[in-house]
Amino acid sequence: MTGIGHSHIAPRSTVRSWLTGALTVAVALGCAAAIPHPASAAQAVNTAGTAHEMNATNTGPGTNEATPVPLGTATNFAVLAGTRVADTGATVVTGELGVSPGTAATGFPPGVVAGAVYTADSVAAQAQADLATAYDNAVRRPGTASLPAQLGGLTVKPGVYNPVSGAFQIAGELTLDGQGNPNAVFVLRAPGLVTAPASAVRLANGAQACNVFWQVGGSATLGANSTFVGNVLALNSITAADGATVNGRLLAREGTVNLDGATVTRSACAVVPSRQTSTKLAAFCDPEAPGHLTLVANVTSSGAAPLAGPVEFFANGVSQDKSQSDDGGRASLTVSHVPTRTHEFVAAFAGTNRLDPSTSPVLTVPVGPKGVCQAPPASPATAGDTAGADNKNKNNRGPVTYPPKKKAFKGRNSERHRHHHPRFRHHRHQR
């Protein structure tokens, strides 16, 4: 059990300041990461050709670097060309195929399109207009680092990259490391792109093909039997040689898309579990133990991650203690020797590496003479469960929750209360 005493006294400002600081520290502890200087990427080139890691600046959510390039209706297309699409082998295209303003889509059969084909119509024209917008969006983004022209053997983290000079080339394997973030975005920009036969682009640690964008100022060529990942946005033409496999899109603004027995599969982003959480707080009085109050926090999320994590309880601006919530998100704390007055309680979930922090609304609890809660008595139950509760019926013995006031926590620890009331004592209940 715990109580409000001389320890952990908060300043006499509103809870907004001290609680914001506490959550800021919690978020910082869960999200802090080293941010290398952009120049470090170019300096990291290993001239011996061994695999090494390239770092990009982590700019955080909401910036251009962390946002996928918006493809608009071009998202529906696996192959889109400006003048024509030409196939000379047993190509398989999964997704829509389009040409605009050109009219020719030849070589189907023997090529197969598992999707609609649009040539010189309004659908293809709109997709080309959206492709132009996406291309310009990729061009305008601030670069976060430079890479050597030869990408083979590198491991690249999320960011916006330009080559030190010339076109990008891939001989061997390039690894795109999502660092555990399925929303990680990679934008690689160059005047040209050439992949060697049997080369490969690999995804690691949650990276998704739908969030990889290759902005090519000229033309792109994917070598025979190569494995490629991402959306190619080329100003001119794109060629995929025999046996090339593409998980993404081949989108050419002005030129042709030439296919020769390639496999092109339109990528789709997997649904990412939500990181958002919500915390609710309830208080329960024990009629047999005046002045005893049990606080129960309930953390919820639409994501699938376990909800176990640290929850801190505050009373009138003072931190009472922390309790670990179970996988279902429930944490509790019992306080005793509660002074006569109206108390304001808050529960703050600090978050985890898979879930964001959240704070409950302020919960007000009036306590009468001799520490008796001025509300129907109840036994501890699941936070937020108000079934059977009736604050007007003094004989009601069901669970009781107190609706929070719509105002900021004001931290009312006066000198009189601190010196004339015994400390709250606490006992953590780990469920």
Image (cartoon, grey):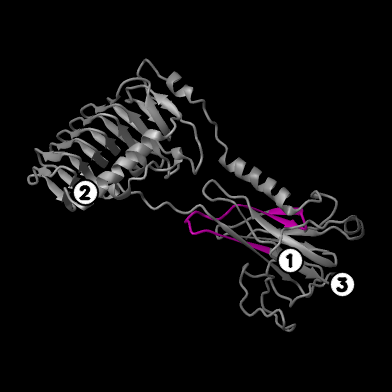
Which amino acid type corresponds to the residue marked 3 in the rendered image?
Pro
**Residue 246 vs residue 215, the one in the foreground:** 215
- For marks 2 and 1, give the one nearer the viewer: 2
Specify whether residue 161 is painted magenta.
Answer: no
Q: Earlier in the sequence, mark 3 or mark 2?
A: 2
**In x, y percent, where is residue 98?**
19, 46
The type of residue carrying mark 2 is: Ala
Residue matched to label 3: 369
What secondary structure is found at the residue carrying circle 1?
strand
Q: What crowding class fits label 1: few (fewer than 14 Cα within 10 Å), some (14-19), or many (20 or more)?
A: many
Q: Is residue 60 visible?
A: yes
Q: Secondary structure at mark 3?
A: helix
Question: In the picture shown, does residue 363 fall above or below 243?
Answer: below
The N terminus is located in which quarter?
bottom right
Sequence-earlier tag: 2 or 1: 2
Q: Earlier in the sequence, mark 3 or mark 1?
A: 1
Give how far across and how far down residue 197 sits, in percent.
20, 28
Q: Over which residues does the magenta segment extend? A: 296-322
x then y, percent, for residue 214: 32, 34
Q: Could you tell me which residue is drawn at 22 percent across and 36 percent down? A: 254
**Relative to residue 368, is residue 72 drawn left or right?**
left
